[in-house]
Amino acid sequence: MNVNSTVTESLQSAAATLLSEGKVGVVIGYGRDAGASISHPMFIRKPEDAERLVFDDCCFGNLAVYLPRDKVRSMGKIGIVVKGCDLRAINVLLREHVVKRDDLVLIGVPCTGQGDPLLHKCSVCEQHNPEGCDMVVGDPVEQPAIDATQRYKDAASLDDKSLEERWAFWSGQLSKCIRCYACRNVCPLCYCKRCITEKTIPQWIDTSAHLRGNVAWNVARAFHLTGRCVGCGECERACPMDIPLGAINQKMAQLMDEWYGFHSGLSPDEKAPFTTFKVDDPETGIL
Amino acid sequence: MITLTIDGQQVEVEPGKTILDAAKSLGKVIPTLCYHPAVPAAGACRICVVEVVAGDRPGLVPACAYPAKEGMDIQTQSDRVMQSRRMTLQLLLARSPGAEVIQDMARDHGITENPFPERAKQTGDKSEKCIMCGLCVRLCQQIIGASAICFDGRGPDRKVSTPYNNQSDVCLGCGACAFVCPTGAIDPADYSPSPIEKIPNEFNCGLDSRTPIHIPFPQAVPNKPLIDRDNCIRFKTGGCGACETICPAGAINYDMEDEFVEEEVGAIIAATGYEIMDPSIYEEYGYGRYPDVVTSLEFERMVSASGPTNGELTRPSNGEPPKTIVFLQCIGSRREVNGKPYCSNICCMYTAKHAILYKHKVHDGQAFVFFMDVRAAGKNYDQFVRRVVKEQIATYVRGRVSKVFARGDKLIVRGADTLSGTQVEIAADMVVLAAALVPSSGIRELSQKLRVGFDEHGFLLEAHPKLRPVDTNTAGVFLAGCCHSPKDIPESVAQAGAAASKALGLVCHTRLSREPTIGIVDESSCNGCFECEGVCAYGAISAKELKDKKGNTLATVANINQGLCQGCGACAATCRSKSIEVQGYRDDQLFAAINAINR
Amino acid sequence: MIQKAKNETTDPSEWQPRIVAFLCNWCSYAGADLAGMSRLAYPAAIKIVRVPCSGRVDPMFVIKSFEQGADLVLVSGCHPGDCHYTSGNYHARRKLLAFRELMTFFGIDPRRFKISWVSAAEGAKWSNLVKEITDEVKALGPFETYSEILTGETGP
Amino acid sequence: MRSTNVDEQTLYTAQAGWLKSAVDILQGAGVDVMAPVETEPGVVELATVKSSEAVTLDYQNVRLPLKRLFFPITEVVLEFKSQPEGDVDVQSEPLVSETEVVVLGARPCGVAALEALDKVFHWDYDDVRYSARRARTTLISFACTRPDAQCFCTSVGGSPHNTTQSDVLVYLEENGQALMQVCSDKGAKFIEQLRDVVKPAPAGTQPPAPPEVKEKFDPAKAKAWLDEHFESDFWTEVALKCLGCGACSYLCPTCHCFDIVDEANWQAGQRRRNWDCCSHPMFTRHASGHNPRPDQASRCRQRIMHKFKYFPERFGQVACVGCGRCVRACCVGQNLVSILTDIESKAKGGDKADVASTLN
């Protein structure tokens, strides 16, 4: 674990100031318990508790997942610690009217990447320095050049396989799914009051953890995130059965990129690919 | 205002007006030659001289250029004036013996002899018309702004020409010089390096030409002239503006722009009519190659009293009346390959009419009609065609024509007479093609705007071929006439009347009825992400705040306007939480339908 | 009588594919209707589900159809630009093509999911299209990839 | 929680290669053998094996809890089919096959969890499917040698060498030999089948001492606090961080909530029993829309209360075996242990302890 002490210190003082000045009701950040393997989400509501905040290279969680929650919103204006990647999720939430920008104070943290070795999403991250935040704690970090060919490498490695091989792979992976919905619940963009899998009139998706239900669920999940997923990778991290959900999201992000030049979450003003169209959109394979 | 007296009558004119203007306001005619109301006067030809008797320095002054002054007393017909005018005419006559307008004026002024030697004795050119008034030069310089023509040479050699006698691109080829020339002396082709392009008269199928400012066709509504911006000198170069100067009503306004007019309406009737297809794709008929092969629409204009020849039927090739005429039916219609498979519906009847019109114009002419079948299924229609056949107004030949080709100045029409089983050849002066009707160009764009379907030929689709032939599948949009299918006038009028009734029936109610199949939102599960709003083509989705009894906002959810929603269901497919259902196409209904494959 | 006619046209020994077709009300359904009115025959393997617009089709309908035993799913709408609802087919185009890629990525045979544009005037196109896709699905055989998972046997 | 006296049991020694023989012998006897198999890199699950080659012994624990063998993730309860005359044919067969199953290599904690499950599934009525699966299965546990930092079996009365509900507890030895402790008649039968490779241990042989697992909290103290704190801000605080993802419950060897669903079309269908989770809002939501556990706080409370208050009150034991799966699975760094230690420190410090500071 490598605590970034400069960022941590300015983060603590910024949070303390925001809270003592009453500009926010809560600061959502990261804390670390002794002996814990990850830094966990933390809700700071008193200025004196701000010293418990930390920023290190194990701040995996995407704190944006807490923004749609009633309990969190009832605390007042929310100060939230955001890495560049988290900001993309917040942009989607803003775009989809889940939160209002005025209700947020975005505390940006420059981030050179999480995990050791570096997470894949961090190795292709182009948002080391979050932009459009209300404040940025710590000095800007160098944004390394990104090898764009690596961005979709997990999807690409599966794309290289034959149809039969892919089905063999995915039917094996999806058979494992126990339908705990951890993937959904950790996703900052799966904020539906009633998930499609919970809709019973009619029943869209079989809730049983057999392959039929699992395929339907995972197809629906992937499709509902198409053009929205910002690639934070929380679903894959949360999956207790280690299903490579990130590869599916990558595949759809790659499509949106190739077809529409769209990258989700770069701005709150963008239009989601499935809410707009161009007359000359790609049209291959239509009879 | 200035008050003056002309021939004993008092008149008031605005300052800056000329004596000619003052005379005009009294209805007095003073002859002019070098004067044009749009061109600043020069007083060059001296034909308009009048005598100032009092109120200013007495003497002869040119009325076109001399300003009216307070207290002037003018004589326009005094001996001194007439003497001067006669001498002017004699001089002009000597110089320009070919000018008919001068000859006429001279005759009107009782001139029988000319004491002045004819210039033609030196030049040998008795056809000289130019009187060197310079109106054309002034016009080209001061009005058109092109300065493409000027005076050239001195003394007897002086003439109107181009600078340095070289034709130049500065000439726009507008032809205004020829238009204003009082004596008809100018052929603009002498000055323009490029051919003078006439503007074809669209209504007459381009058979004659029109001016840039024109009334589109007789009985146009409104029956007012319009300016064709693409051809108007004013819009092309910023020059001219003559029409504005001349128009007594001050109706010309060059600043007027085409504008989009937005009207909120309750119903739309599509009545965009038809065009006829270009028969030149069928080379065997020679349309476009032989001037005497014309379409039925061109023939219609040719025999019209308001047409290019004022109703006189002549061969376009040589102006002679066509003694033999052949009408060919079903050109492009009822043709599966390289044509339109449908019947154009109106050709049988108008061809019979054309045969009658032809006989009216050319009493001793002979008309032939090549036909496939005669389809005359309207009231009194068949009797009409029978009459043409029985009275031998036209000879009907059942069969197709394989070729039309020229031999001498005749067109040989070679075809089959399938009733006698023989090949026939007719040496015709004129061939008239009854080309197929097609929908107006732009119908596809229109159909997309109106959200109305169209068939493979572009005709708009009715809601039901038998039960709703006037409606379309889009509520509030109705069809009339040939945008729907080829129709004759009574049918079009009937459909238009039906469409109007339908439209009135729709808008005369205070409440609208709508289809029940519209979207509804489950407010308990709606996330309020408004992705549905993005896909709604009707702007039917808006935000609705759900409040508790105290007025606190609990949630903001989507709300579908029941009047605007058309029930397409794009929102339902987009909604991730499945909070929108389309009534009649609910998810459970569709799932039940999918389930039916197991039955 | 009807029963008899059925027996005559269907050889019970021959496997008959199940095709679910989602047709938009204004173009493709009308096109299929026109095929009928024009007496253009096409295979009876196709079962039509009428929807107001191709934009109404949630891609999960396709999965639902496979779950019910469809060997092929077709979604057909108006040609681009001709949508009765202006833009429904444009939205459908984006969604359905992306969905097909997703299917393909999972290894679910994309030949089992067809998209077409058939206008109200294209009765003949409809008839030919159904013939073609029926022939194709007959050549592909039953959708075993999916029928294997239909039984819903135990999970992990 | 050791319910049996070690002295009464018999210890056996198994010679090297006993595992291969065991698989072969059981296979020969028509028994379905399940054993730890590395299903993907770093992941070991119990799976049916045909030979011992597929078996791995290098594992800390299997990923999915043992309960799935008796209480499957999804199982058919009954099937129904419409008949031509409009009747519905209901078929509650087939039940569970009678094929004997021997599980080689379950961990003691997972097996011990069956004690809690047995009580639930035999409680007010006998769950026939669960019972049938239990009856046909012989559980040969492998003593735990590698407890990790997340393990806490000792805190809930367990041990790496817990014999509870095991038929045989096997102490693997480095040289391929093993010491076997028979715990039940089924275990004795298993030893009898392996008589060629297993011999009674010399007198005085003692099982090895279990590896150390740190005790992290005391369930009794926790219960005392829980008894008094159904209503407490503590639950709100716990729930703040909890995403309600359910991974902890699904991986828990003692969690046994289930959902009954009908999956049907017009022609036929199945009624199924599926794992469910009290952390999910849908779990308690009524058809009316009313939800007696309307927020994550009440759901988090239920999970803790059930394991450490209601279950002990009803069945005399906590519904936790300390396997540590929930600790490893939680992606927001919150889990039973952190909550229970917080509760314990609150119990010590009284109600006035600063909730936020202890939790966050």
Image: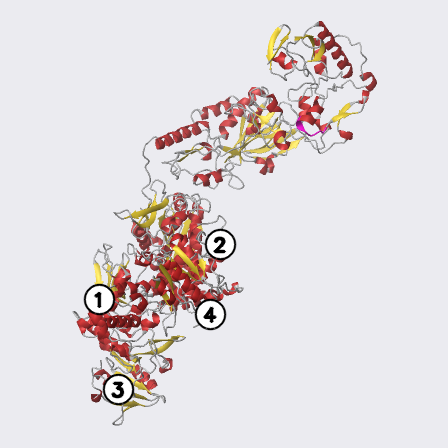
Identified by mark 1, the residue type is: His
Between marks 3 and 1, how big is the CA–CA gap? 43 Å
Magenta stretch holds residue B59:
no
Kindly identify the amino acid type of the residue bearing the numbered disc 3.
Answer: Gln
Residue D229, which numbered label? 1
> Percent x, y for residue B319?
65, 24
Measured in 3D between alpha carbons, the distance from the residue under mark 1 to the one under mark 4, in whole angstroms, is 43 Å
Q: Earlier in the sequence, mark 3 or mark 1?
A: 3
Measuring from the top left, give residue B198's x and y in whole percent. 64, 29
Q: Please state which of residues C38 and A97 is positioned toward the viewer in this rendering.
A: A97
The residue carrying pointer 3 sits among few (fewer than 14), some (14 to 19) or many (20 or more) residues within 10 Å by Cα, namely many
Report the residue marked by disc 3: D181
Q: Which residues are magenta?
A: B143-148
Do the CB atoms of the residues marked 2 and 1 lie less than 8 Å apart?
Answer: no
Badge 4 element? loop
Q: Which residue is mark 2?
A: A260
Q: Which circle, 2 or 4, is nearer the viewer?
A: 4
**Residue type at numbered disc 4:** Leu
Indicate the position of residue B121 as horizontal and vertical percent values.
Answer: 82, 16
Q: Quadrant of residue D328?
A: bottom left
